[in-house]
Image (tube, rainbow, N blue to C red):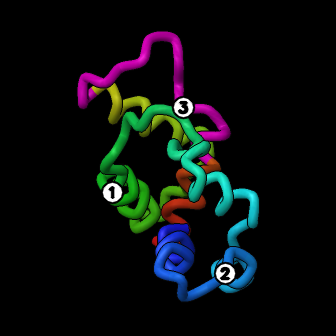
Amino acid sequence: IGEAIKSIKDDKMTINEASAKCNVPISTLYNRLSGHSSNPRGGTTILSKQSHLVYVIKTMQDYNHPVSNSNVRTIARWCTTELKKDIPDHDPGKDWFYGFMRRWSSE
C-alpha cells in the first residue's frame, strides 16, 4: 500500500493505475489518501517479535513432532506468559493463528 500511495502522491500514477499495479482496492487508496483510515485493521500486537515462536515450531518439526493449530496457539500463550504480557482469560484464537500463518508462510 505504501508504494501505491507514494506513487500517487508523486504524480507517477493515477489512483486507478496504482490500484491495478499494486493490487490494492481503489477504496483503500482513497481512504488512506483522505486520512479517513490511517489505522490498519487488527488487534493490539502482543507478540511483536514472533520469530522466536517460529523458531520453536521449526525445531519441533526438525524432531519430527507434528505441530497442530492448537499446539501453535498453546505455545503462543506460553510466550505471552513468559514475556509477562499475559492476557487473562484470553488465549490466541483461530483468527490469530490464521493471521500468524499468513504472516510467516515463507518460513
Taking the view exactly as shown, the residue that stands out farthest to the front is 11
Residue that mark 3 sits on? 92
Residue that mark 2 sits on? 14
In primary-sequence order, the first of circles 2 and 3 is 2
Mark 1 neighbour class, 10 Å CA radius: few under 14, some 14 to 19, many 20 or more: few
Q: Is residue 88 above or below residue 2?
A: above
Q: Name the residue nearer the viewer: 67 or 50.
A: 50
Q: Name the residue nearer the viewer: 50 or 25.
A: 25
Mark 3 neighbour class, 10 Å CA radius: few under 14, some 14 to 19, many 20 or more: some
In primary-sequence order, the first of circles 1 and 3 is 1
- Judged left or right of residue 92, residue 31 is right
Q: Name the residue nearer the viewer: 38 or 8.
A: 8
Residue 54 in the image, given as x and y percentages of width and height: 39, 57
Q: Going 59% across and 45% down the picture, which residue do you hit?
A: 37
Quadrant of the drawing holding the N terminus: bottom right
Secondary structure under the numbered disc 1 in the rendered image: helix
- Extent of the magenta region: 82-97
Rendered image: mark on residue 51: 1
Amino acid type, residue under disc 2 in the picture: Thr
Rendered image: mark on residue 4: none
